[in-house]
Image (tube, grey):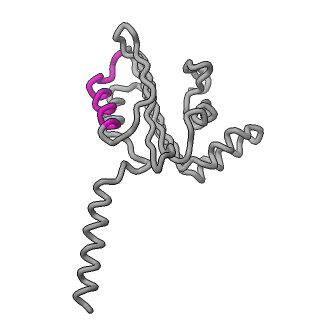
Amino acid sequence: MRFFRSMFLAVITISASALAQTQPPQPDWTPQGIEALGQNASSRTEFTLDHSMLVLASMLDQDDEDLRRVIAGVNGVSVHSYRFPRPGMYDPDLLSAVRQQYHAAGWKHMVSNHDKNGGPGATDLWIHFENNAISNIAVLFAGQNQLNFIAVSGSISPIDLLHLGGHFGIPKIEGGVLVPAPSGDR
């Protein structure tokens, strides 16, 4: 009897180990290189809010029903925002490496908007599916002298991401255009 218990335990341990190696990234997964992209930044803002912090923060805007509905399905938000003293001070190779990591991790690249003249401006949207439902969204806004990376985990749609815009450090987007924050909000 003891032999069977030991074998059962061994099989469970090996199966769990193999399953852990094939699992997609965790909801709070951030690609290597995001923080390195901000190494030359003159200003950095980085934070992560879990579900309970988001619920508490959403109570500050009692009139926004869409925001509270979206927050109900969100597990967490992570924001990395970097400002640079001059245009093009972040490493484009690191930016490419981040894009490759998402591809390698099985995320779907849904939006790719790059400067037509080959400049540093770009917007990327990645979505991670779990059981045919969106489980994570990541957005990267790369401007000439700024870089914003936002990762949202939980049950959320790309449209819901628009409702989060202007809250929790997520840039506001109107008509498909990133709206700069007023100078007093920085």
* Image quarter of residue 166: top right
Outermost residue toward the right in this view: 63
Pick out the residue farthest to the top. Answer: 117
Query: Image point 54% across, 50% down: which residue?
Result: 75
Residue 54 in sight from this viewpoint? yes
Taking the magenta stretch, the answer to whether it contains residue 86 is no
In this rendering, does residue 145 appear at all? Answer: no
Tell me which segment is drawn in magenta. 88-103
* Residue shown at 40% from the left, 21% from the top: 84
Q: Is residue 21 left or right of residue 165?
A: left
Residue 3 to residue 15: above or below: below
| Residue 107 at x, y percent in the picture | 38, 39
Query: Is 112 located above or below residue 157 in the figure?
Result: above
* Residue at screen point 38% across, 26% down: 41
On whether residue 93 falls in the magenta region, the answer is: yes
**Residue pushed farthest front?**
132
Prevailing SS of the magenta stretch = helix
- The percent position of residue 16, horizontal first and vertical second, equals 31, 66
In this view, the residue in front, 84 or 179, is 179
**Toward which corner of the image does residue 138 lie, by quadrant?**
top left
Vertical side of 161 occupied by 6: above or below: below
Quarter placement of the N terminus = bottom left
Is 137 on the left or on the right of 73, as rendered? Answer: left
Q: Nearer the viewer, residue 66 or 106?
A: 106
Residue 123 in picture, x, y percent from top left: 44, 23
Horizontal side of residue 10 vs 40, given as left or right:
left
For residue 141, side relative to residue 17 (left or right): right
Tell me which residue sits at (36%, 7%) in the image. Answer: 117
Residue 94: % across, % down: 28, 29
Q: Quadrant of the C terminus?
A: top right
